[in-house]
Image (tube, rainbow, N blue to C red):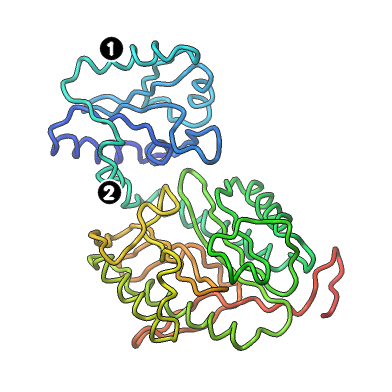
Amino acid sequence: MHKDIPEKCKRIREWLKRKGYDGLLITSQASFSWLTGGRGFIGLASERACGSILVTTDRLVLFVNNIEANRLQNEELEEDYFEVIKTSWFSADEEKAKLEAYTSQYQHIVHEEDHLQDVIKLRSVLTMEERESYHHLGQDAAEVLEEVCHTLSRGDTEYQVAGQLAKACYERGIEPILTLIAADERAFYYRHPLPTSKMIDHYVLLALGARRKGLVASLSRLVHFGSIPEALARKHRAVAAVDGLFIEHTRPGVSVSDIFNKGARSYEAFGFKEEWQNHHQGGMTGYLSREYRATPDSTECVELYQAFAWNPSIAGVKSEDTLIVGETNNLIVTRTEAFPEIEISVGEKSLVRPAILERKHQYAGKNFVEL
C-alpha cells in the first residue's frame, strides 16, 4: 500500500489547476498502480485497469464493478483515501450512468488517454517510497535472474529456463511480465527472443521484466559454457562500453536526444556502426517497461529521481540494467555486485557492467559435472 497517495494527488491537483480542469479520470493499469501501489489488473498484460479512478480538486473516487470491488478494497487500496462507487459487471449502461451522474457536478473532467504525455510526466519523478521500493525490486529481480544464470543447464530448453525465472519471481512477489531467452544462434538472430523449445548448448541470453507494486525493473544477463570466444568477448566489451556511456550521461538536465546520439555514435567507434538501428536503445522506465523510448529526436530532459533502463545491443549480446537518477551519482538498482563484472571507461571515469558469466561446470541436479 502506498503512503504517498496524498503527494501524488497533490501533483495531479496542481496540474488540474494549471490547466483549468476540474478532474482527471485515470483508466490505465500503469497510472492505477502509480497512484495506489495496487494491482489494478486481472491479466498480466492488461493495459487498462479493472477500475477507474476520478481525481478531482477535493475527491478521490474509485468506480469499479462488483467482481473486483472487494479484492481492490481489501487487498490493493488504502480505503481511507477512496470513495467507492460499485457497478454491476453485466451492465455497461449502469457504469456509464453512474460516472456521468457523478461528474455532472463538475464542468471540465478530462480523461487520461487524452493527456498521456502530461500523465507520464506526473508519474515520472519517483517519491522516496518509490525509490526504496524500486531498489528492493531491483535487487530481488537481479538475484532471481543471476541465480538462474548459475543453475540453468546445458540441455535445458528456453521454455524451461523461462519457467525457472517465473517460479523464482512469484516466490518473491514479482510479476514476470517479460521473459526473453535465446540459446546459441537465436541470440544472434533475434532481438526479442521469445522462449522456444530450443535446447541450450553453449550460450544463452536472458532478459527479465520484473514488476512489483506497478514498478518495472528491466535487466539482461549472458551465460557461456566453456571458454568465451574472442569474437563474442569483443562484441560484449563494445556493448558494455556503449551502455556505460548511456548510464554516465543520464544526469539531471541533460537532453535525452543528446544521450541517445552520443550512444549511437559510440557504436561506430567500436566497429559496429549500424547496430543501433537494429533495436531500440531503451529510455525512461517506471510503471511501464519503457515510459518512452529514446530516439535521436526526443524532446525530454532527464530529471532527478527518474528511472531509466538502457539496453544497447549488438547481434548476440546486450547490456541492460535499471537505474535511478541521483543527486551526485546514479543508483543501478539491479546491480547485486555478486555477478561477474567488467570495468569500462567513460572519459576519465570508470564504471562496471555485468560480464558474460563463464560457466566451468555443467549443473546436473545436485552434482556438478566438469566440462
Per the image, label 2 sits on a secondary structure element best described as: helix
Could you say which is closer to the camera, residue 69 or residue 29? 29
Q: CA distance from mark 2 to mark 1?
A: 30 Å
Is residue 160 found left or right of 287 in the rendered image? right
Rendering quarter of residue 317: bottom right
Q: Is residue 11 above or below residue 370?
A: above
Q: Amino acid at mark 2?
A: Lys
> x, y (%) of residue 281?
41, 66
Please tell me which residue is depicted at 58% across the width and 49% down the height of the picture.
176
Disc 1 marks which residue? 101
Position of residue 83 in the picture relative to residue 135 (left or right): left
Three-letter residue code for mark 1: Ala
Placement of 31 over or under 339, stated as above or below:
above
Which residue shows up at 34% across the image and 57% down it? 306
Q: Is 19 drawn above or below residue 282 in the view shown?
A: above
Q: Which residue is mark 2?
A: 121
